[in-house]
Structure formats: C-alpha cells, structure tokens
Image (cartoon, helix red, strand yellow):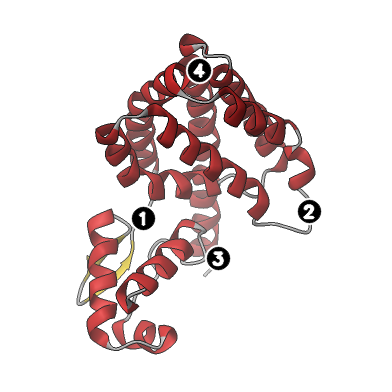
Amino acid sequence: MRASDRVYQALRAEIVAWELAPGTELSEVEQAARHGVSRTPLREALARLVADGLAMPRGRTLVVSGLDAADVRHLVELREALETQAARLAARRGSSEVFTALAERFAAAPALLVDHDPARTAYYAVVAELDVAVDEAMGSPHLRRALAGLRPHVARIRRLAHGDAARLVRAADEHRLIATAIADGDETLAAQATAVHLRASLDTALVTLRAHALDASHLEGAS
C-alpha cells in the first residue's frame, strides 16, 4: 500500500470515528511525524480528505470539517434518495441467504452493544457489512459510485449515536427489518424500512448535535 493511501485511510477512519473531532487542526508537520511519512504523501492524503469533504482549509492549515444540523439534514435527504433505491434493487437482485444471515446477526446485535465497548466496534462492523452486501446485490455501478462518496459522511452521522445504547438497539431492529425485506425480495418494504430508519437516525443526530451545542455554550459561559 502506498504511504499516501495508508495515511488517508488512517485519518479518514479517525475522523469517521470522531477520534479527530470537527475543528481539529491537521498540521502537516505533526501528522507527517505521527504517521512516519514525508510531507509529499501526507499532502496527497490531506487533498483526498478535502475532496471527500472531511477536511477544509482554515487560515494557513487544514482542519476536520464541521458537521451541523443543516449538513446532517442535507446528507440524510440524499441518503434517502439513494439508499431507498439501493434497497429496492437489492431486494430484486440479491441473495436471500446473505440477507437472511445478516438479519439474524442484527437480531443478536444487543449482545454487541455492551458497556465495555463504548465505540460499539462490533456493531458498526455488522452495519458496514450490510452496506457492502447492498452495494454488491443492487448491481448498479453508477449508484454504487454515488453511495461510495457518501459513506464516510454516513458513518460520521451514525457515530453520533454511539453513546446511546437504547437507540442502537432500535437501529439494529430497523436494520434487521431492512435485511429481512431484502431477503424476502419485498422491494416496497425494503425501501420503506430504509426510509423509516433514516428518519429515525436523523432525529437522533439532530438531538445529539443540539446537546453538543448546548454543552459548548455552557463551557464558553463558564470560561
């Protein structure tokens, strides 16, 4: 793997997981030293993050892009347009066995949402597998490319709920219903279940962002 690819993947994963929070400075000197690369591959990696919309210029450096309520609404609007169609196509063309197995794993997902794993790593891995299975099943390369550009932002929004185990249990059941509908070849239910899940995710994300904004304002008021 090229050095620039390795650094890009590492930084993208940290941004998606909120290990690098919005506004975090991506200093070339610091990041090059941290990842053990020269400035040239680092700059290539940072340029890709900017193209993805995950980093943006601020003054003479780059910072991790913010994520506000308007961003989330716009992303979910686009997700609903793309992912409901993807679910329809997956139900039409996908393997019943693959999605039945995923539905069973989502039914067992509450066991993955344990307190000692605050990042909910195992749960998000199953969600990522569902994304991959839908992408492969739908058989639409153009739609797949459109979704690929959206995936990092989708993952960031999902992680807003990582501390809310009750919401994640509900989300797992929503994913179970999506996978079951696709396994059954029910295009209408697959699309409807996807839309319901996305709207519930939007509500959770907006509540979380409002709470973060209130916390930030309280800290500023105390300083």
In the picture of the structure, the residue carrying the numbered disc 4 is 190
Q: Residue at x 47, y 19 (%)?
A: 91
Mark 3 highlights which residue? 222
What distance separates the C-alpha of mark 3 from that of mark 4? 48 Å
Q: Secondary structure at mark 2?
A: loop
Sequence order check, earlier mark of 1 and 4: 1
Q: Amino acid at mark 4?
A: Ala
Give residue 165's position: percent from left, percent from top.
71, 42
Where residue 126 appears, as percent x and y from the top left, is 61, 43
Q: Amino acid at mark 2?
A: Asp
Give the secondary structure at mark 4. helix
Label at residue 188: none
Q: Which residue is mark 2?
A: 115
Where residue 38 sits, quadrant-wise, is bottom left
Q: CA distance from mark 3 to mark 2?
A: 31 Å
Q: Which numbered disc flags the more N-terminal residue, 1 or 2? A: 1
Question: Relative to residue 71, is residue 187 drawn left or right?
Answer: right
Question: Mark 3 or mark 4, which has the lower sequence index?
Answer: 4
- In this rendering, would 176 be left or right of 76? right
Q: Are marks 3 and 2 in contact (CB under 8 Å)?
A: no
For the question of whether residue 20 can be seen, the reply is: yes
Q: Which residue is the site of mark 1? A: 66
Callout in the foreground (1, 4): 4
